[in-house]
Amino acid sequence: MLDNVCLASIGPQTSKTCHELLDRVNLEAKEYTLEGLTKELVQYFSRG
């Protein structure tokens, strides 16, 4: 059900949990804040 969903993580611990539960993460914020996550999402969706 989540094949077409972008899984975005705010940091390494969240990414670890996503990998454990969902087997993937599409992007992880470099700066572990809401602003950092937002920047990564904007960049991710601007690429394609």
Image: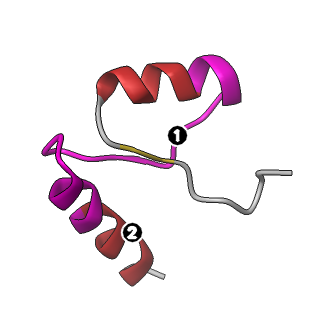
The CA span between labels 2 and 1 is 12 Å
Q: Which residue is mark 2?
A: 44
Q: Which residue is mark 1?
A: 25
Which residue type carries mark 2?
A: Tyr
The residue at 37%/83% (across/down) is: 46
Give the crowd class for mark 2: few <14, some 14-19, many >=20 residues within 10 Å.
Answer: some
Residue range in magenta is 19-39
Seen in the picture, residue 25 relative to 21 is either above or below; the reply is below
Residue furthest to the front:
34
**Lateral position of residue 13 relative to residue 6, left or right:** left
Marks 2,1: beta carbons within 8 A: no
Q: How is the image coloured?
A: secondary structure
Q: Give the percent coordinates (x, y) of residue 6.
A: 57, 58
Q: Give the percent coordinates (x, y) of residue 30.
A: 18, 44
The residue at 35%/20% (across/down) is: 13
The residue at 52%/20% (across/down) is: 17
Seen in the picture, residue 14 relative to 36 is either above or below; the reply is above
Q: Could you say which is closer to the camera, residue 3 or residue 48?
A: 3
